[in-house]
């Protein structure tokens, strides 16, 4: 039994109003005066979320409690547990990880393809010793192949293709039948340092030369085109002093060494 707060009359526990004076009595049995269910506290760690069919998605974040759900807009109460959020975070991180892995994988694949092409396809355009460099020089002239000539142009030259084309144009009236290396002298370290300084001064680039040779070569050639100096069809010997430099395990023609050409 409980007492009416107005007149003190004994009232039944489930009564909603005093039978004596008509005063409203609070219902202590777990139901509100209107008969609706009273909000309860939740012991679970959940987050109350309201999805409104009229206004979109509304998130209400709680820690240990649920707010009374509003029915405005025909909203549908949904409960998201912390496990659900943890699963989402794990999946999100997994997706980011897979994306990063794909980027690294395709970058490595592209590098591998470039390396294989460079090694198996373009390696024949790179000289790995002085003799290779002379041989590619001869092939470039006889086949009018700019790729071979460009392959022995030093990396510190800005327009290697243009320089290669100039050399081919100058030698276009000649066919090299054979050649012999008459002399091969290694540059002393002092001369290499001086050459690097000269290249730095001319090109503003650093040429990391590890070795260098001066090579005296005699070419047996036939004149195959019009020339103001040579007769068409004539056979003659040409002697050149050619300098070759080694940079990153590749050999290149030091193009300034073309100034001395002896037509015999």
Image: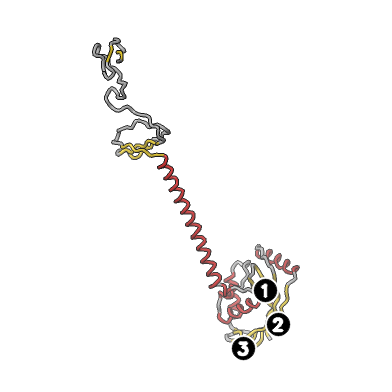
The answer to which of 14 and 225 lies nearer the viewer is 14
Q: Residues within 10 Å of mark 3 (few under 14, many from 20)?
A: few
The answer to which of 34 and 232 lies nearer the viewer is 34
Tag in front: 3 or 1:
1
Residue 158: quadrant of the picture: bottom right
Q: Which residue is mark 1?
A: 244
User: Is residue 44 depicted above or below 196 in this figure?
Assistant: above
Q: Sequence-wise, which precedes: disc 1 or disc 2?
A: 2
Q: Which residue is mark 2?
A: 182
Give the Cα distance between marks 3 and 1: 31 Å
Q: Sequence-wise, which precedes: disc 2 or disc 3?
A: 2
Residue 60: quadrant of the picture: top left
Q: Name, please, the residue furthest toward the top.
A: 7
Give the Cα distance between marks 1 and 2: 15 Å
Kind of element beneath mark 3: loop
Kind of element beneath mark 1: strand
Which x, y percent locates residue 23? 27, 14
User: Is residue 97 depicted above or below 64 in this figure?
Assistant: below
Q: Which residue is mark 3?
A: 231
Q: Sequence-wise, which precedes: disc 3 or disc 1?
A: 3
């Amino acid at each position: 039994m409980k007492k009416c707060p107005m007149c003190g009359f004994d009232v039944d526990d489930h009564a909603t109003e005093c039978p004596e004076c008509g005063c409203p009595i609070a219902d202590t049995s777990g139901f509100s005066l209107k008969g609706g269910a009273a909000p309860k506290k939740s012991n679970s760690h959940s987050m109350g979320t309201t999805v409104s069919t009229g206004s979109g998605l509304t998130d209400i974040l709680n820690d240990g409690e649920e707010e009374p759900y509003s029915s405005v807009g025909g909203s549908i109460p949904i409960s998201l547990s912390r496990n659900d959020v943890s699963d989402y975070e794990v999946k999100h991180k997994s997706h980011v990880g897979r994306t990063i892995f794909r980027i690294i994988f395709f970058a490595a694949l592209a590098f591998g393809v470039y390396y294989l092409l460079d090694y198996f396809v373009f390696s024949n355009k790179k000289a790995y010793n002085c003799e290779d460099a002379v041989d590619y020089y001869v092939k470039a002239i006889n086949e009018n192949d700019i790729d071979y000539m460009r392959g022995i142009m030093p990396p510190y030259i800005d327009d290697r293709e243009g320089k290669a084309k100039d050399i081919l144009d100058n030698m276009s009236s000649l066919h090299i039948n054979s050649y012999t290396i008459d002399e091969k002298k290694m540059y002393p370290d002092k001369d290499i340092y001086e050459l690097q300084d000269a290249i730095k001064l001319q090109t503003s680039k650093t040429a990391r030369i590890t070795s260098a040779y001066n090579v005296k070569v005699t070419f047996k050639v036939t004149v195959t085109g019009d020339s103001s100096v040579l007769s068409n069809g004539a056979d003659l010997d040409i002697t050149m002093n050619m300098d070759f430099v080694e940079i990153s395990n590749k050999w290149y023609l030091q193009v300034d060494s073309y100034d001395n050409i002896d037509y015999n």
